[in-house]
Image (spheres, helix red, strand yellow):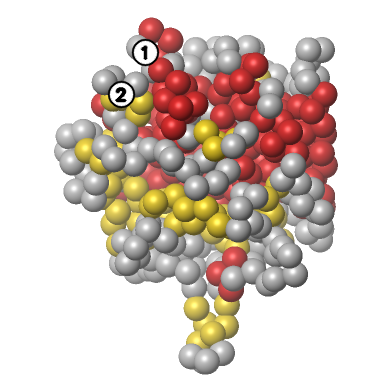
Amino acid sequence: MLISLVIFLSPAPARAADSPAQQQKMLETGCDALVHQVAAIPGNGPAFVQSYEAADGQPLAPALQNAAFVYDNALASIALVACGKTAEARRIADALVLATSHDRHYHDGRLRNAYRAGAASHDPLELPGWWDAPANRWDEDAYQVGSATGNVAWAALALMTLYDTTHDRRYLDAAASLMNWVATNTFDAGPPDGFIGGYFGEEPQPLRQSWKSTEQNVDTYAAFSWLARATGDSHWTAQAQHARDFVAAMWNAQEGRFNIGTQNDGRTLNAGPSAIDAELWPLIALPGNATSGWDHSIDWTLQHHRTGAGFGFNAAPDGIWTEGTGQAALVLQARGHGQDAVPLWDVLLSQRAPSGLLYATPNERIRTGLAIGPTSKNADFDYFHLPHLGATAWAVLAAAGWNPFTGRRLGA
């Protein structure tokens, strides 16, 4: 995505001769699981895939029972392209396209953080929710009905992946609509300038989340840059530069890592926490890091995020985060640490649920140390031992050697 030429890549699964057998097994079983998830939704039209499955005979929490998170679905669509399964990838991408213009309230191109899982056949598109019998009311999750900047950018990345693969202009136009919303509604010029977290809660006046995230600015940089490459429009280049400047400002040269972002004021550095996505994603999404010293964040990650044979969400983690372990496997391969990735395939394969999806964590529960939203009273953003679409998609991307920020295989 970071050079001026678009290189068309065949979406057949990677099968390098020197790939470990376990890596190939992860690719094949992961692709099969993603295809099965899409095929289970009746028809051939637009569809959202449920993010989590019940496990161990216990029902899902009400908020997860019919929730298809945009981030997970965007990842799954990209991973399906890497699997060579374009038809299945398009079903999800087509649902994302519909969502840009079929909202029950907004008409500005934004996406919600989640939609009702299943065929996307209603107008407006349905949002997740559940009946609260004791309160005699229909409830919705405040995060799910909000719009996080990073989730919108990931949807744009999925749509650009399908645009490069199919040359269907609808995907390019929808991605541009999404990123126009990001540029118009989430940019904050106050130092360090960059894109804020987004909006939390229901319409008509969701809460503005003014903190800025390293990870989300990586996402926006990648989407803006891809649009610039595809269209030649300097507007997208300028927006990408804002995001890049923020990520560069978050580099902590003294510690050899990226700070996670800012605090709620959008100005004050949030120097305490560490998140593995903020540490690793810049290395495969942004250009010019080979001479900037950013690869030292790999050393930081290996030292501070390792737990057992895998990786955790935060520094000094309390358990393996499967999704982050997949991210590490991809970045380690991309940055010349392929041997460090080899043991991770067994870790990932060990997390296969009966459906083929990977558990979000082998632990009953792991903590991120972060809050779900501004109304949280504590750090309530946790992962649980549940089969997870997003974790599976990241494992597939790693096994395929597919960079979701560029739409290219590693080394291409």
- Identify the residue shown where x is 74% and y is 42%: 350
Residue 291, image x, y percentages: 38, 7
Mark 2: which amino acid?
Glu
Q: Which of 293 and 93 is in front in this view?
A: 293
The circle drawn on residue 255 is 2
Q: How far apart are marks 1 and 2 (CA)?
A: 11 Å
Query: Do we see residue 376 in this rendering?
Result: yes
- Identify the residue shown where x is 35% and y is 29%: 258
Query: Do we see residue 230 in this rendering?
Result: no
Residue 81, image x, y percentages: 71, 33
Residue 85, image x, y percentages: 78, 36
Measured along the vertical axis of the image, is residue 81 above or below residue 51? Answer: above
Q: Residues within 10 Å of mark 1 (few under 14, many from 20)?
A: few
Q: Which of 304 and 259 is in front in this view?
A: 304
The residue where tag 1 is placed is 293
Measured along the vertical axis of the image, is residue 300 above or below residue 44? Answer: above
Mark 1: which amino acid?
Gly
How many circles with numbers are drawn on the protein?
A: 2
Quadrant where the C terminus sits is: top right
Q: In this view, does 189 lie to the left or right of 112?
A: left
Q: Which of 71 and 25 is in front in this view?
A: 25
Give the SS element for disc 2: loop
Residue 20, image x, y percentages: 78, 20
Give the SS element for disc 1: loop
- Identify the residue shown where x is 50% and y is 87%: 137
